Amino acid sequence: MKASYRFTDRVYATLDRVSEEELRVILQLKNAEDEQDVDALIGEFSNELLNQALLERVRLETEDIRRLIAEQAFAEADLGSDPPVRQQESH
Amino acid sequence: MSRQFRDRTAFQRGDRSYEFLPFRFEPFQDGVLLVNDVGEHLVLDTNVFRRLLNRELDAESTEYKDLKAKHFIWNGDTPSTLRILATKQRTRRSFLDGFVRLHIFVVSLRCEHSCHYCQVSRVTTNKSQFDMSVETADRALDLVFRSPAKTLKIEFQGGEPLLNFELIRHIVLRAEERAERVGKDIRFVVATNLALIDDDILGFLRDHGMFVSTSLDGPAFIHNKNRPRPENDSHQRAVDGIRRVRDFLGPDAVSALMTTSRLSLDHPIEIVDEYVKHGFDHIFLRPISPYGFAIRTQRHTGYEVDLFIEFYKKALDHIIDLNRQGRAMTEVYAQILLTKILTPFPTGYVDLQSPAGAATGVVVYNYDGDVYASDESRMLAEMGDQSLRLGNIHADSYEDLFGGELARRLVDESVVESLPGCSDCAFQPYCGADPVENYATQGSFEGHRPTSAFHRRNYALIKHLFGLYYSGDTFVQDLLWSWVQNRSPEDLLRRRTA
């Protein structure tokens, strides 16, 4: 789903759950002129699927530790002190 | 009975006991750029990356040690690792401490310029209709001092705020008195085109340590075209005004902001050189804001984001060359991004935060008492869209304005960890969300990343800065660090020759 989302500037994406293990993705080009780039698009999508699979693996493996770090970070926050603000950067 | 240790090589096949710490990644040059949750980064060869994921890294290898030192992996046996990461996370988010620190007062909507892309100004002499009243200003000050921040900043905007200078005088005196009473620091900025500045105004600004922010879009042919006046002299007035402010208040009391128009896109070198010519050592290459009249006059000033990115890269290359020649010049947006990339410290820049700075870092009190989540929100209102109006200072309480449904939605829908397209982006710790721009250009606070100019611009600029940093040019790497550390070029040269 995340991989498909990244291509929604160029395609309409339809996702169908075929079975517990299988998801059918249909990508339809928004502009017919892009048709000549279809092979490149398929290649990019395949790479993105791989990226997302790896990202998901790391995300799942680190889910608990991420929560622990966030809890510790905010539990010790000192809400009384301001960080410095650079004059030119405020807006 | 004796036991024999296994041979050293047995341990070098890979340390399968390590665990991942939260990180994301991005293809970069010929390898992979890894960025963890607290913004530390590391560039790995693709093969090493594969071995990392397969837990095949040699525990004695440099890559393994780098990954451990930069908190991408750990062995689960060092509690201090979590403490360090929590501290860095807290430091990165410390811009949230103190809540709203920047309070913008629109003291008048009147202006004597008629800029193409200005969303808000009115060329009129009718003071009562478009000037903020003393009563409204006092009520706004009540809200300013409800803010828990120890350091507050009030910025006067317009229209042209100097057209209602008597009210600025009143607000400054009243705010200083109140700040002293409650033990807060307060600073003031006037955002002005400088066309109306005189010795009386300058004397007051000097006596109260006020700072001036003005506009300089580039050479006269660009500035005058962007900011028309009947006499076609807005550039000359800006340059004269900058000189007068420096003479009166000191060299660092005035900063200039440039707005990029379609005309600007063909002149990156000339624009940078104009800043050098007038003695500035900082330039902020800003894209035009996609709001209000800016959208309405798109044929005149609109352009594709890719053109801006190319413009930015050319200007940045020129700035690097100038520094190489010994002329100090910092590009402020690069400085902001690099501070996020190379340090755990927040920048105070409200337009690139998560959650967004609208209504949590900045608020706007309009001349008529309406309160907006950001300057851009009131611009939309001037176009007839009141969706981002938090309320009115005469009708609504502090709690309603800052804790109401709209303020909460702006926070809820601008946390990058939960936004589609952002949640899995390697650059997440360096970036932010802009629900107001999303709303103005895409119709929802959440926005749509694949077609968002905000996303496209920031993704491209962050990646470009990484490219420069890892270009192999040690001068560029030292220069980028000097911007983060606010070091002078003399110091940079001294360190390089030492």
Image (cartoon, rainbow, N blue to C red):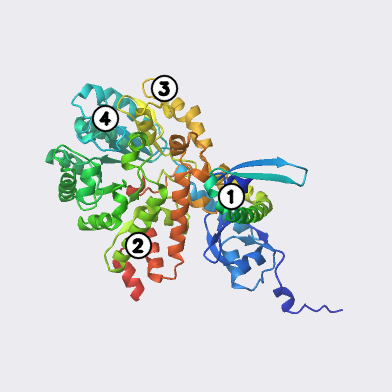
SS for dot 1: loop
In the image: residue B21, left or right of residue B471:
right
Q: Residue at x 35, y 71 (%)?
A: B495
The furthest residue to the right: B1
The amino acid sitting under disc 4 is Leu
Crowding at dot 3, Cα within 10 Å, few <14 / some 14-19 / many 20+, comes out as some
Q: Residue at x 48, y 33 (%)?
A: B443
State the image coordinates of residue B27 (x, y, percent, origin top left): 56, 60
Vertical relation: B487 (above or below) B436: below
The residue that disc 4 covers is B109
The quadrant in which the N terminus of chain B is found is bottom right
The amino acid sitting under disc 3 is Asp
Chain designation of label 3: B
Real-space CA distance between mark 2 and mark 3, rounded to the nearest whole angstrom: 49 Å
Q: Which mark is residue B317?
A: 2
Real-space CA distance between mark 2 and mark 4, rounded to the nearest whole angstrom: 38 Å
In the image: residue B239, left or right of residue B10:
left
For this rendering, which residue is in front, B410 or B495?
Answer: B410
Real-space CA distance between mark 1 and mark 4, rounded to the nearest whole angstrom: 42 Å
The residue that disc 1 covers is B424
